[in-house]
């Protein structure tokens, strides 16, 4: 065996480098995946803190027959005014979190962390806050929120993915828009409001 190793030192060295290199790459990938998972969990925890201490009672208003096909009007009874929740000096990441979580009400995605009901009160207040600040992606936020204000949710999956990408999303890309029946089920499961 010693003579084989001595005669084939180049091949032996190459095999050893390949084995060690593969082990190193696997270790780095695994360690990176662990950190990525921790980042997703931390992002989830952060998103849940968008509205700390706010008790929300969501009710549903019936719209016209046309609106029922694409929009369910949700209203909230809140303990704190919306201006205290979405303040003038709100960070850009908090704006992204709010839009992202609101979009979960209507998008199809394999994973969703956090959910906020889409209400006109929220949309109008977020527009006010965005207009008051010089966020890096201000125009993107205004485009999304203005569409929602006009009850245009046809591209909400694209809106979700735009924000998701800005947040460095790797899991939970939106793949479509829910049907009205799927959205009703989501509202019942996440906001506790029963819909007819």
Image (cartoon, rainbow, N blue to C red):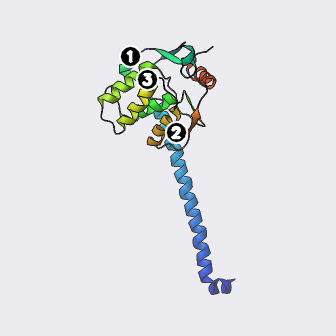
Discs 2/3, front: 3
Q: Quadrant of the C terminus?
A: top right
Q: Circle 1: is it few (<14), some (14-19), or many (20+) Cα within 10 Å?
A: few
Residue 79 drawn at (x, y percent)? 43, 14
Q: Which residue is mark 2?
A: 41
Residue contact at pointers 2 and 1, CB within 8 angstroms? no
Discs 3/1, front: 3
Where, by quadrant of the figure, is residue 46 drawn? top left
Residue 7 drawn at (x, y percent)? 64, 87
- Helix, strand or loop at label 3? It is helix
Among numbered discs 3 and 1, the one appearing first in the sequence: 1
At 39% across and 19% down in the image, what residue appears? Answer: 82
- Helix, strand or loop at label 1? It is loop
Above or below residue 23? Residue 76 is above
At 34% across and 27% down in the image, what residue appears? Answer: 129
Residue 82 visible to an observer of this rendering:
yes
In front here: 150 or 30?
Answer: 150
In front here: 186 or 41?
Answer: 186
Per the model, the C-alpha gap separating discs 3 and 1 is 20 Å
Q: Which residue is mark 3?
A: 149
Per the model, the C-alpha gap separating discs 2 and 1 is 29 Å
Q: Which mark is residue 98?
A: none
Among numbered discs 2 and 3, the one appearing first in the sequence: 2
At 50% across and 30% down in the image, what residue appears? Answer: 103
> 135 left or right of 116?
left
Q: Circle 2: is it few (<14), some (14-19), or many (20+) Cα within 10 Å?
A: few
Where, by quadrant of the figure, is residue 2 drawn? bottom right
Q: Which mark is residue 81?
A: 1
At 42% across and 22% down in the image, what residue appears? Answer: 122
Q: Quadrant of the N terminus?
A: bottom right
């Amino acid at each position: 065996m010693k003579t084989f190793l001595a005669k084939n030192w180049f091949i032996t060295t190459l095999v050893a480098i390949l084995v060690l290199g593969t082990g190193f790459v696997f270790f780095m990938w695994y360690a990176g995946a662990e950190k990525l998972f921790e980042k997703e969990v931390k992002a989830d925890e952060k998103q849940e803190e968008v509205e700390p201490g706010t008790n929300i009672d969501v009710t549903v208003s019936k719209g016209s027959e046309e609106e029922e096909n694409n929009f369910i009007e949700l209203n909230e009874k809140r303990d704190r005014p919306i201006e205290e929740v979405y303040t003038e000096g709100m960070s850009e990441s908090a704006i992204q979190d709010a839009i992202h979580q609101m979009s979960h009400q209507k998008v199809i995605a394999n994973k969703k962390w956090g959910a906020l009901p889409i209400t006109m009160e929220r949309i109008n207040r977020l527009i006010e806050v965005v207009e008051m600040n010089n966020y890096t992606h201000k125009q993107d936020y205004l485009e999304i929120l203005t569409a929602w204000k006009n009850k245009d949710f046809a591209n909400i999956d694209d809106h979700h993915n735009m924000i998701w990408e800005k947040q460095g999303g790797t899991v939970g890309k939106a793949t479509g828009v829910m049907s009205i029946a799927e959205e009703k089920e989501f509202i019942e499961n996440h906001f506790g409001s029963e819909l007819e």
